[in-house]
Amino acid sequence: MAGHTAQNEEDLKLMMRIVECDESAFSALYDRYSRVVYTTVLRMVNLTDEAEDLVQEVFLQVWNKAGMFVETKGSVYTWIMTIARRKAIDRLRSSEHVNKTTSLDDDDVTLEVPDAAFSSNPLHATVSSEYEEIMRNGLALLSSDARTIIELSYYEGYTQDQISKKLNVPLGTVKTRMRQGLMKLRDHLRKQME
């Protein structure tokens, strides 16, 4: 998609300016991606205050580590979302989070609605919707087994061992299905970004 290529080029320019400590570039990148980061981490941690904290941590890392971004390894969006996912999983695994919320096996966890401030900006809504649609379409291409494993891992923070126990499937099968699913998803995302 030409739109995604142009957007990534804009992101790369912002990143180069952020490396030079340009606060306006950082603000522009934050405005572009804070909502999608918030939505993603909220889905994982299920607590608005935790999600808000994580958004700040993610973008603090973006500011501090902008020079470590490697363009050949993926888009700025992918880099930011990888940071977000890792931080959310770390939070899920921390004892502090375990004491604040229910266990991962609790089916009665309720997601709170994100603050209006995150959804009021039309650009945030558009970017978030586009990427969510691309991800939904990509996940829909996967077998239900692979999709379930990827969703448990990436959106709920389960380890492969926990997924194996939860689904009563051998660990090797979980690893294989995850690897195959991620390869198919990666190919889909690459085609969408062209």
Image: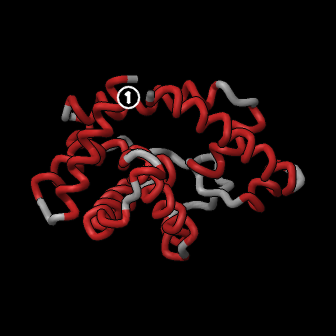
Foreground residue among 33 and 186 = 186
User: At label 1, which amino acid type do we have?
Assistant: Ser
Is residue 180 positioned above or below 1 on the image? below
User: Which residue sits furthest bottom?
Assistant: 95
Query: Can you give x and y, in whole percent of width and height, for residue 79 in the image?
Result: 42, 53
Query: Can you give x and y, in whole percent of width and height, for residue 36 in the image?
Result: 36, 42
Residue for point 61% across, 35% down: 185
Q: Is residue 56 visible?
A: no
Is residue 192 positioned above or below 30 on the image? above
Q: Quadrant of residue 53?
A: bottom left
Q: Residues within 10 Å of mark 1 (few under 14, many from 20)?
A: few
Foreground residue among 185 and 2 = 2
Residue 71 relative to residue 18: left or right: right
Query: Can you give x and y, in whole percent of width and height, for residue 132 in the image?
Result: 45, 32
Q: Is residue 96 visible?
A: yes
Quarter containing the C terminus: top left
Is residue 77 positioned above or below 105 on the image? above
| Coloring applied to the structure | secondary structure
Residue 79 relative to residue 31: left or right: right
Quarter containing the N terminus: top left
The residue beneath circle 1 is: 129
Foreground residue among 120 and 8 = 8
Residue for point 30% across, 66% down: 67
Residue 126 relative to residue 44: left or right: left
Residue for point 70% across, 30% down: 142
Q: Give the mark count.
A: 1
- What secondary structure is marked by label 1? helix
